[in-house]
Amino acid sequence: MKYRDNLGTDVLALALLCGACSNDSSNSSTQSSGGSTQTGGGTGGSSAVGGQTSSSNGGGGAGGGQAGSSSGGSQAVSSCENATSVTPCGGDVVGSWNVTSSCLELAGELQATGTGLGCLTIGVTGSVQVNGSFVATAGGKFQDQTTTTGPVTVTLDKSCLFMSGTNTECELISVAIEGLGFHDVNCVDAAGGGCICPGTVQQSGSMGLLVADAQTSGDYTVSNNTLVTGQNPLTASELAYEYCVANGTLTMTPKTDSPPTTGSIVFQKATDGSGGSGGGGSGGSAGSATTGGDTGAGGVTVTGGNGGGGTTAAGGRTATGGRSARGGSTAEGGSTATGGDTSSGGTATGGGTATGGSTATGGDTGAGGGGGQPPGPDGPCDILEAASTPCVAAYSMVRPIYKSYTGPLYQVRSKADKNSVKDIPLLAEAAYADSKVQDDFCAASGCTVSKIYDQSPKGNHLALSPDTFWLTLTGTPRSGGGLNQKESDVSKNPKINVGGHPVYGLRFTSGQGNAYRVMKGNGTATGDQAEYMYAIFDTTVYNGSCCNDFGSAETTGNPDSFTSMEAIYYGNATMWGKGAGDGPWFSCDYEAVISPGGSKVDNSIPPINIKKFATFILKGFSGDRIALKFGDAQQGALTLQYDGSRADNGSPMHKQGSIILGTGGDGSAWSDGVWFEGAITFGCSDDKAVDDAIQANIVAAGWGT
């Protein structure tokens, strides 16, 4: 998801011109990016981006792919010969600039922050070209309408395969590498250990830099012959360029050592009135052949999709360990949530310091004393309590999930004054968050989300994560590399309607350390004790990094061992397990294994195919049994995804009872995601009517209406 600033300027962004390398290649308007390097002497090259055959030395694969080392090495044949970098001289960058030529050589180590790999850097070789235009205004705003394309080869030391306390495999690690800004990565085993990963760069924005979240617009600064257009969210390094303006020409070289880059991008300044639309002109990226002729994993038909009642579930496989899986049943219409019960009193559930060791930031106000709504229908936690499985953690950015709860839902903190916080209450006239309170408080200087209140009596309020293996407020994490945790910026949190009222979700942005945690939960399940959890996620926001989680994790903040976690995960990470196709999947994060079903890789489980808002239910029974259900939060019934033995003999469990949101058990916070609501119980109901009543309550709330 990208957030774009509008440029208040009358500067015209002119038509894109395609760049050309400063070698013997043609200056055609559809410049080829060349092919991917062959590994092991015969995997074949990818089709040229844009469709033009690359001029290369030596033989190549079909479609313009260039030949690589027959010994399985990491050589990426370059189409940039004798690339030279700019001699910086500074100058006035204001105006609209069109690329006329470019060629950049990549050779060296790239910081691997953001993947959870067991190594701090990975090797990258290759060459890229930049096409398009760049607009800079006198007010310090920019629009980067460029595309950066080209073939690369990534090499991984065998130490990179050790992730979150376990070893993964080359064939499962490609998605993690793509999370650093690459595309079409296909990792294979290298001689002597490690992996060789041919791939491509196909990036819009952040011209010539390898960035997981490329910037297409924003603020820029110039100083000391250097242009800065933002910050890499994974590494916190500047997105910077050395530059020189002379005689209507702007020449830039990316200022980075991750990986070291030589060469330049040359722009010609556009004249007023000569421009057309600025978005086209870069070659099409279609046509790359999979390495070694493997069939692409896309296009998998989702069996047992997410429609309303009567849809066949995706389960139906035999569970590992000899126990028959209970998936495969037809989804049935949900029963209506029982409602109308009289409130038992309406006592405030908060009022003191959060138990379980989480520090109340910015002054912990009590969870009671909010809006004055009369009790309504049973909420999810009323339903679960009636089943003798009470909630021990209950959170929502949107609404009360107990019918008698009247306290604040969450708290925001002013960016201008870290000690200034504001509770977001319920509307006086309806049981939804009063988002105007947030809008008014944050209008002047912006805000972050400092706390999500626990609506249960346990006081497990979620605040910014304490230090963990991958996270630290200051200094260096225990891992030797990682992130500084930061509260989620409300400017990135999506505003939606629920029940006709505007409310916000909670956005986790890759590399921003948006991790919330109660390190030692009060009343949570431990060991092999049973628990039940549900959550509502935005299905359109995810990535292949760790970990878009909600649930139970380690109290140590370390990747202790397989079975030390039990959390809902949503995304398309493959390093610790996967389902069929390319994802995304709803899975259980066990620590070191993220499984959607009965094994680490369970190809009987299809990707989630829900348009916008999903209900995920994870039922963690005592003994060797787990069940996963999902449904559309806007309509219809639940679908049983899996019910059977735990993945990879994951019994008994060794849960520790920490509560996490937007992070992995070890503090990995490189995921993208949007979360709205969730709860965790002590004990686990096996009554289908309970699940159906919760789903009926969620649908009745009116998500997206």
Image (tube, grey):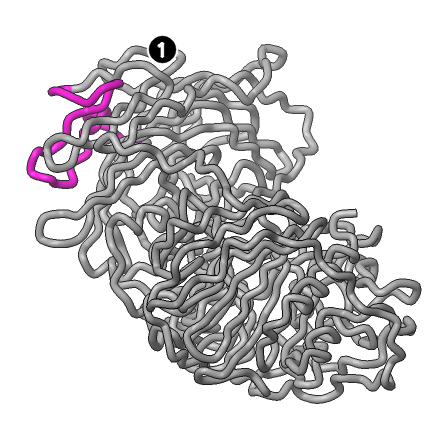
Task: Judge whether 24 appears above or below 478 on screen.
Answer: above
Q: Residue furthest left?
A: 71
Left or right: where 422 falls relative to 604: right
Q: Check disc 1: other Cα within 10 Å, few if <14, some if 14-19, many if 20+.
A: few
Q: Which residues are magenta?
A: 57-85
Q: How many marks?
A: 1
Residue that mark 1 sits on: 28
Choose between 630 and 474: the one closer to the eye: 630
Q: Residue at x 42, y 21 (%)?
A: 284
Question: Dividing the picture into quarters, in which one does residue 211 lie?
Answer: top left
Residue 127 seen in render: yes
Q: Residue at x 82, y 54 (%)?
A: 499
Give the image location of residue 380, x and y in percent: 72, 69
Q: Magenta span: helix, strand or loop, mainly?
A: loop
Task: Judge whether 115 appears above or below 320 on screen.
Answer: above
Give the image location of residue 333, x and y in percent: 70, 54
Residue 483 seen in render: no
Choose between 143 and 77: the one closer to the eye: 77
Q: Residue at x 70, y 65 (%)?
A: 694
191 drawn magenta:
no
Give the image location of residue 306, x and y in percent: 60, 47
Choose between 527 and 465: the one closer to the eye: 527
64 drawn magenta:
yes
Left or right: where 3 falls relative to 351: left
Give the image location of residue 47, x and y in percent: 30, 22
Which quadrant would the N terminus be assigned to in this image? top right
